[in-house]
Image (cartoon, helix red, strand yellow):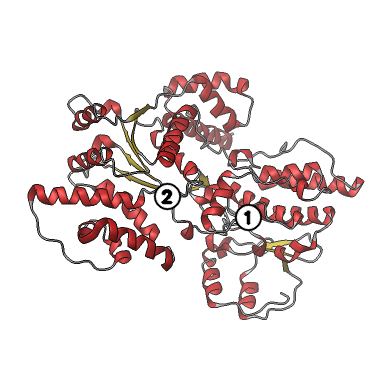
Amino acid sequence: MSHVRRKPRRFVMRFDREFPFEDILDGDWALPKAEFEAWRAGPARENGLRSLADFIDSRLPTEEFLRMAVAVTKAIGQMHASGIVHRDIRPENLLIGDGLERVWITGFANASRLPRERRSSMASENIEGSLAYMSPEQTGRMNRSVDSRSDLYSLGVALYQLLTGFLPFSADDPMGWIHCHVARRPVPPSEKSADISAPVDSILLKLLEKSAEDRYQTASGLEHDLRRCLEDCVASGSPSAFPLGEFDVSPDLIMPEALYGRHEEVEALTNLLEEVAETGGSRLVLVSGYSGMGKSSVVNELQRALVPLRGLFATGKFDQYKRDIPYASFVEAFQALVRQLLSKDEAELQSWRAAFAGALGPNAQVIVEVIPELELIIGKQEPTPSLSGPEAQARLVSTFQNFVGVFARQEHPLVLFLDDLQWLDTATLDLIGHISGNQKIRHLLLIGAYRDNEVGSTHPLARRLDMIRASSNPPAEIRIGGLRSEHVRAMLADLLRAEPDVVDRLAQVVSHKAGGNPFFILQFLGVLAEELQYEERVA
């Protein structure tokens, strides 16, 4: 490999994580271990390999760009066929051979052999991958899983940069990059350079779709369209228009993760969030419905709306077997937020440290006792005076409210989501009542979800909610019902990539069997798909 210097230890340790994949890394498309060892020892032998990054400033002619794009896509397709999702596709990890028609992939430190993996919201500093190239779902703010289509988005960013000389987005900090990938639309490549043909322009924009369902579904489908552009370019000098994705059919049945029939509910929550962010108030929202109706999925859609607000999202879930542990869900939610803070740089940590000191004062140890991680930020605290009974409880509730106020601020509104309220403990129930009625806590959207069929008139939650409803600041309430047949039809059309009228009869059967419950629908479809695959194997 030409012009290779000895790599720093941090680089070597990162690449050492690749070797669990060694048994399935094929030398036809991945950098072999022997070559890697030579590279690590450096300087390696001359073999003509150059990274894709070396070509970005070259402004390649269309034909050369297409040859390289086809080769890269073919290698990524071979990698996916081997069961690997890379999760860090970028120019530096794509090595181009002489002739521009062979590509080897490197940088498997973040790779996964899981076909789908859900990313939770985390501090932007902790996100794995390269911020400029990562897919929207890799940010953890999309309420969607990461799969092979995430690599195709990252490839779209790299090819856009290779063709135009510019990244599709620019940002100054991690949250800025997340906002770009989640919410901003890229400028069409043809507006960067007038000589970019319409088919190539459309292919790149399709790769950069925010929703994975709207992108290319397979590398092979993308490769087919790129080859067609290349053939046209060789024959006539420029690709001609054609329908994209005609051969883009996944061999696997990918269950859709988009929300169907929930537009009104998501819009209502988004409007409440914007109200809290703009007016500085706080709101309690109650989301109810049967198990499996998608209450959590609807609430989690708010993570996307929080990105431009630079807001925070904390979630805790009650457990029917832990109802004797007071405040367990609150502790779970805020432990996650405190752990995110630990990844901040010292300058930002100092700002948080001062905010905690001002809000908690001499009672900081009260919170440290339930969230020990906080001590890593604010340091060791003086013991608080010993209290008992109602006085100790009142101090804890008051201090906890002040603690919540540190996270819920104009510069970063807070969404606090507590799930499965039907199993909450009495101490947390009391705390929710205090927080929802505290006018000093601002920029807070407190959301509680519960199974209304399990909360009768004598349930402690029902009595407390009746009191809150009668207060001067009643909660907003959203009930999640079953999906209508047209929503099931749309889901099946996306799943099978067919026109809605083609799946109409199947949609009626599925709706009848599952009763409009999204969880039961997906379970039913999964079983049906397994049976069909089994019958095909037997046949």
Residue 163 x, y percent position in the rendering: 76, 54
Q: Name the foreground residue: 401 vs 130.
A: 401
Instruction: Tell me if 139 is positioned left or right of 444 in this view.
Output: right
Q: Amino acid at mark 1?
A: Ser
Residue bearing mark 1:
170
Q: Amino acid at mark 2?
A: His
| Residue at x 74%, y 38% (from the top left corner) | 244
Q: Do tag 1 and tag 2 residues touch (Cβ < 8 Å)? A: no
Residue 148 x, y percent position in the rendering: 59, 49
Residue bearing mark 2:
412
Front: mark 1 or 2: 2
Q: Is residue 74 visible?
A: no
Residue 290 x, y percent position in the rendering: 34, 28
Relative to 343, say whether 138 is above or below: above
Q: Is residue 4 visible?
A: yes
| Residue at x 75%, y 73% (from the top left corner) | 47
Instruction: Tell me if 395 is positioned left or right of 131 in this view.
Output: left
Indicate which disc residue 271 carries: none
Residue 197 x, y percent position in the rendering: 82, 45
Q: CA distance from mark 1 to mark 2?
A: 22 Å
| Residue at x 58%, y 34% (from the top left corner) | 536
Q: Element at badge 2?
A: loop
Q: Could you tell me which quadrant the N terminus lies in?
A: bottom right
Q: How many neighbours does mark 1 have within 10 angstroms: few (below 14), some (14-19), or many (20 or more)?
A: few
Q: Name the foreground residue: 361 vs 161.
A: 361
Give the farthest residue toward the right.
Answer: 236
Q: Which badge, 1 or 2, comes first in the chain's sequence?
A: 1
Q: Element at badge 1?
A: loop
Q: Name the foreground residue: 389 vs 399.
A: 399
| Residue at x 19%, y 67% (from the top left corner) | 382
